[in-house]
């Protein structure tokens, strides 16, 4: 059974405008091209009658009564007639499609008689063929839907949400960016930024074939196929370059990003994933990147409207990813500064993502979350903050950048030559031991100082025995000669420890005398 509400979304019928009357009163049985208004009384039940000759305004009421008596589903006026309604004086409002108002009596008759009043222009014979094809739901209708999708999908290459909208428009059914559930049709394609999965209602017969074909094409396009293949594959590499390139190159990289569709001018939050497998980070993180992007994009697309017009701005977060600096960086970007609701949703997604990845990957994955910053330099700043957050807390699976801004101030402070020299002098003997021996000592010293020189509280924070804390502190004092009873020394060491653990301090030059 096909209703007018479904029919008007079929290929070849989207130019038909709804003027009045219900779209779901009767099932449509076919179409008929009629040259004379007097023959409306002979229209088959459930038919869509396309009138080729104008109907005088004084006879429009009569035409609707005759169509209703015959049981017709709709009467289609020529576009010229629909435009003629603009001269009718009425107290009624403008119809939902924005056409000129119709007389109140016409609207009332259409509603009471359960006949839809439509307007169309162009090739009326082709309109009748399109109605017959959609009602039959045969191979011709399926082919027309596939052809329409094929025309629209190249323009949606690399954009899963837009590809889903194009597919939904061609098929006349909802298409969502997610894995198919029981009783649904689905398609997937592996792209450079993760697997793209699409789902739609399961249909039978030729309609089902159209759904399967269009979903397969849409998934390939969304994954980066067709015209968008090269740009999509390049965005990840360009993001990696932005993260590690010298600052003076960022303006040129930003221009390349805009050309490739990387939203460098938005507001960014970086997630940095590191693994406990030194030397094998990229081998472990590459499959993690694909799975993480697929999950995050699925969750983000779930808040959108798949039936919206292609190219419409949803304001939703966009995700990109890169492997750089022995880590996976996932970049969330909004067109405007994320508010409290966007930040809350991001926090939920990060926790869900980390839990999912922990179950599917044996490596010890940890995630640092940077703050929100704008522009291409904001990408780098948020990524640095995510890295600093991970170094601040070694055991937590998810660590968020210091909201009070202490890490940011520390990073900016350490950029100065005098600060770097001071840190080098204070902790040089400890850092000279090498990273594997120095880091436990520095971390223990920071915890000890943060807890007011309390071995018991530091041991509790580090999950160590207090004797182990005491031994490490004595070792630091032996190496540095620091007087931990001096408040100024304690403050200097606290800042130095934070700088080292935030990854901003370089190892000392042990070749110097």
Image (cartoon, helix red, strand yellow):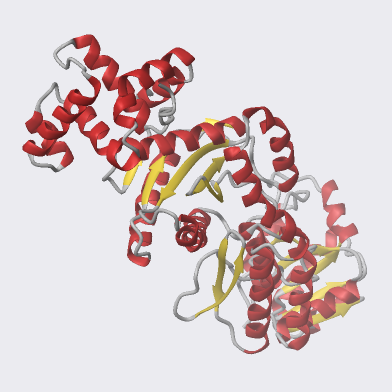
Q: Residue furthest front?
A: 513
Residue 14's image quarter? bottom right
Residue 173 appears in the figure: yes
- In this picture, residue 275 sits left or right of residue 12: left
Q: Is residue 403 in view from this perspective?
A: no
Residue at screen point 55% across, 63% down: 177
Q: Quadrant of the N terminus?
A: bottom right
Q: Is residue 501 above or below residue 396?
A: above
Q: x%, y% of residue 188?
A: 58, 72
- Asked if residue 22 lies left or right of residue 184, the reply is right
Of residues 21 and 215, the one nearer the viewer is: 215
Residue drawn at x 64%, y 38% as measured from the top left: 264
* Figure label count: 0
Residue 221, image quadrant: bottom right
| Residue 35 x/y as whole percent | 92, 76
Q: Is residue 387 left or right of residue 43?
A: left
Query: Would residue 415 be found to the left or right of residue 125 on screen?
Result: left
- With respect to residue 467, does 81 lie above or below? below
Q: Position of residue 491 (x, y in %)?
A: 25, 15
Q: Nearer the viewer, residue 318 or 63?
A: 318
Q: Quadrant of the C terminus?
A: top left
For the point 48% across and 41% down, the residue is 270
x, y percentage for residue 92?
Answer: 69, 47
């Amino acid at each position: 059974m096909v209703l007018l509400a479904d029919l008007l979304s079929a290929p070849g019928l989207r130019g038909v405008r709804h003027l009045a009357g219900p779209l779901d009163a009767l099932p449509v049985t076919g179409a008929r091209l009629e040259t004379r208004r007097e023959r409306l009384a002979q229209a088959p039940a459930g038919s869509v009658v396309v009138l080729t000759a104008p109907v005088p305004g004084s006879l429009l009421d009569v035409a609707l009564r005759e169509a209703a008596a015959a049981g017709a589903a709709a009467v289609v006026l020529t576009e010229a007639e629909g435009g003629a309604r603009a001269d009718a004086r009425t107290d009624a409002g403008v119809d939902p499609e924005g056409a000129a108002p119709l007389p109140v009596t016409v609207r009332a008759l259409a509603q009471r008689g359960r006949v839809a009043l439509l307007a169309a222009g162009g090739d009326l014979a082709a309109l009748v063929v399109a109605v017959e094809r959609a009602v039959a739901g045969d191979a011709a209708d399926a082919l027309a839907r596939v052809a329409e999708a094929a025309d629209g999908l190249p323009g949606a290459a690399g954009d899963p949400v837009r590809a889903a909208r194009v597919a939904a428009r061609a098929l006349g059914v909802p298409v969502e960016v997610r894995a198919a559930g029981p009783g649904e049709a689905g398609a997937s394609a592996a792209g450079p930024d993760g697997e793209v999965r699409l789902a739609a209602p399961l249909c039978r017969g030729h309609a089902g074939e159209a759904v399967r074909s269009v979903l397969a094409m849409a998934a390939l396009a969304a994954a980066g196929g067709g015209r968008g293949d090269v740009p999509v594959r390049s965005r990840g590499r360009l993001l990696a370059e932005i993260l590690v390139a010298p600052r003076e190159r960022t303006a040129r990289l930003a221009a390349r990003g805009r050309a490739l569709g990387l939203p460098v001018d938005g507001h960014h939050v970086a997630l940095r994933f590191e693994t406990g497998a030194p030397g094998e980070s990229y081998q472990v993180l590459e499959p993690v990147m694909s799975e993480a992007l697929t999950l995050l994009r699925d969750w983000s697309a779930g808040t959108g409207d798949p039936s919206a017009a292609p190219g419409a701005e949803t304001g939703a977060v966009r995700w990109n990813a890169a492997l750089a600096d022995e880590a996976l960086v996932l970049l969330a970007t909004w067109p405007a500064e994320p508010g409290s609701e966007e930040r809350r949703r991001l926090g939920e997604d990060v926790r869900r993502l980390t839990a999912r990845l922990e179950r599917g990957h044996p490596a010890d994955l940890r995630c640092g979350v940077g703050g929100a910053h704008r522009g291409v330099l904001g990408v780098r700043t948020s990524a640095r903050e995510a890295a600093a957050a991970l170094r601040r807390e070694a055991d937590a699976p998810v660590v968020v950048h210091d909201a009070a801004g202490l890490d940011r101030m520390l990073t900016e402070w350490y950029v100065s030559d005098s600060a770097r020299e001071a840190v080098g002098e204070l902790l040089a003997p400890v850092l000279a031991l090498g990273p594997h021996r120095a880091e436990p000592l520095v971390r223990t010293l920071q915890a000890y100082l943060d807890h007011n020189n309390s071995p018991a509280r530091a041991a509790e924070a580090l999950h160590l025995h207090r004797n182990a804390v005491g031994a490490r502190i004595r070792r630091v004092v032996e190496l540095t000669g620091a007087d931990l009873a001096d408040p100024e020394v304690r403050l200097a060491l606290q800042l130095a420890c934070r700088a080292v653990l935030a990854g901003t301090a370089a190892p000392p030059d042990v070749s110097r005398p």
